[in-house]
Image (tube, grey):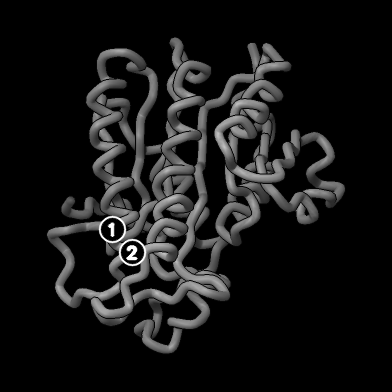
Amino acid sequence: MANPTTLIIGANSEIAKALALQTVNKSNNGLIVITRDPSFYLQPLFRNSKVITLADYQEYSINEAIDSIKENKATLITNVFICHGLLHNQHITPEKRLQAFDVDSFTEVMNANTITPMLWLKNLVPYLSGKETCKVVIFSARVGSIADNKIGGWYSYRASKAATNMLLKTAAIELARTAKNIKLISFHPGTTDSPLSKPFQKNVPEGKLFTSEFVASQLFAIVDNSELDGEVSFVDWQGKSIPW
C-alpha cells in the first residue's frame, strides 16, 4: 500500500515551509510541493520529496503540475494545503477608506486569494476522488466572515476571502454527492509572523502573533481530528468554528 502523501501548493509561504518541514519529519509520510520558487526545497532533507516548479498559476500550468503528480500512480494524497494569499505588495495596500478602492488592485487580490485556489480545487478533485479520505485545506481569514465584520476596511481582502468561503461552501454541497471522500477546510491561521503580516504587527495584541511552526502544528491537529462529514469547516487556528 502506498504511503500517505501531503501536497502543499503555494509552498513558499512561511506556514507552507513549516508544514513541509513537519511533514518530512514524520516517518513514512511522502511530500509533494508546488511552488514558483523552489530554493527552500533544495535542502538535503527534501531529497525524497517531489518538488514541482511553476512559472505561474494559470490553469494550463496547474494542469501540467497535476499531470506531473499523476506520473507516479502509487501516490496516495491524503492531505492538501492550498496556501495562496495576497494582502499587500509593492503597489497594493489594504484599503482603509472606500475612496481607496481600486479596480486593478481588487482584481489582483481576487485572483490570488479566490480564483487561483478554486482552479486548484477544480482540477484536483477528479484526481483526489476515490475511496481514501483526503482533507483539503484552503487558507482563508477571519476577515472573510461577513457576520464577524465589526470594524470595516480592507475591502478587497475581505471580499476575496468571503468569496472563497462561499465557493467552498458551494463546492462542499456538490462533493457530498460526487466525491464523498474529500473533506474541505477553510482555515484562518491567525496573525503569523511572516512578510504578509509584517506591516500590521504593531497592532497585534500580546500573545497573538504566532510562529509559522506553531500554526503548522495546530493545523495538522485540526486536519487529523476533522471528520468526513460532507461539509466545509470554517475554523481558526484553535479549531474553533468561525461564523460565515
Image position of 86 with respect to 233: above or below:
below
Is the residue under label 2 in contact with that under label 1 (CB below 8 Å)?
yes
Seen from the viewer's position, the closer of residues 79 and 123 is 123
Residue 48 at x, y = what percent? 80, 34
Image position of 35 with respect to 184: above or below:
below
Locate residue 151: give its quadrant.
bottom left
Badge 2 marks a residue whose secondary structure is helix
Locate residue 118: give its quadrant.
top left
Residue at (81%, 46%) from the top-left corner? 45
Residue 106 at x, y = what percent? 38, 62
**Which quadrant does the N terminus fall into?**
top right
Q: Residue furthest bottom?
A: 202
Q: Amino acid at mark 2?
A: Ser
| Dot 1 crowding, Cα within 10 Å, few <14, some 14–19, many 20+ | many
Seen from the viewer's position, the closer of residues 121 and 30 is 121
Q: Amino acid at mark 1?
A: Ala
Badge 1 marks a residue whose secondary structure is helix
| Dot 2 crowding, Cα within 10 Å, few <14, some 14–19, many 20+ | many
**Which disc, if any, is residue 69?**
none
The residue where tag 2 is placed is: 156
Residue 218 at x, y = what percent? 44, 54
Residue at (72%, 16%) from the top-left corner? 71
Residue at (46%, 58%) from the top-left corner? 108
Q: Is residue 2 left or right of residue 185?
A: right
The residue where tag 1 is placed is: 159
Image position of 104 with respect to 152: above or below:
above
Q: Is residue 228 left or right of residue 131?
A: left
Seen from the viewer's position, the closer of residues 146 and 79 is 146
Give the spatial CA distance, label 1 vs label 2: 5 Å
Residue 6 at x, y = what percent? 59, 34
